[in-house]
Image (spheres, rainbow, N blue to C red):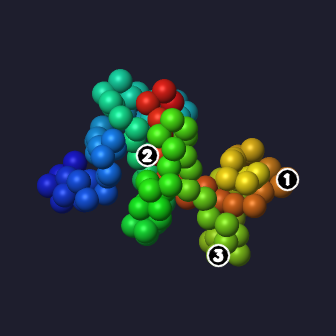
């Protein structure tokens, strides 16, 4: 994290969440595996973002404020008609506020993954 990122991180996180930056080598392994490599350095629930997603600060604030630190939390977009590349989007089927299915090609879905997650320590 650079000085600008550190200032942003301090403003972004509430008590119990703290900014962590890690360089992860990119290889042929799956994204989830690459993302889990720095987890042994994290001591509190954390915000995970996908580097190729754009989002407004308000979405991050809402996710942090409504998250359960003991569960994996995901921000989703329910406005399917506003998704630019629906074929490439990670589709989510929800039941209430729970995700029951997630994938690129599900038959039934009602939201799209935004690339924002609040992750528990025991991910």
Give the CA distance from mark 2 to mark 1.
Answer: 27 Å
Image disc number at residue 48: 2
What x and y, as percent, mark residue 11? 25, 59
First in sequence: mark 1 vs mark 3: 3
Mark 2–mark 1 CB contact (< 8 Å):
no
Picture quadrant of residue 80: bottom right
Q: Residue at x 55, y 38 (%)?
A: 71
Vertical arrangement, residue 74 with respect to residue 55, above or below: above
Image disc number at residue 28: none
First in sequence: mark 2 vs mark 1: 2
Give the CA distance from mark 1 to mark 3.
Answer: 19 Å
Per the image, the residue denoted by label 3 is 82
Query: What kind of element bears circle 1?
Result: loop
Q: Residue furthest bottom?
A: 82
Vertical arrangement, residue 78 with respect to residue 34, above or below: below
Q: Residue at x 30, y 46 (%)?
A: 15
First in sequence: mark 2 vs mark 3: 2
């Amino acid at each position: 994290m650079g000085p600008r990122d550190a200032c942003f991180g301090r403003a972004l996180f509430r008590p119990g969440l703290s900014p962590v930056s890690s360089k992860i080598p990119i290889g042929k392994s799956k994204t989830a595996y690459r993302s889990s490599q720095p987890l042994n350095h994290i001591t509190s629930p954390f915000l995970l973002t996908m580097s190729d997603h754009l989002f407004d600060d308000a979405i991050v604030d809402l996710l942090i404020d409504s998250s359960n630190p003991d569960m994996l939390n995901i921000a989703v977009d329910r406005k399917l008609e506003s998704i630019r590349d629906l074929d490439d989007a990670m589709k989510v089927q929800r039941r209430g506020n729970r995700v029951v299915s997630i994938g690129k090609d599900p038959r039934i879905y009602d939201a799209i993954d935004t690339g924002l997650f609040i992750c528990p320590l025991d991910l």
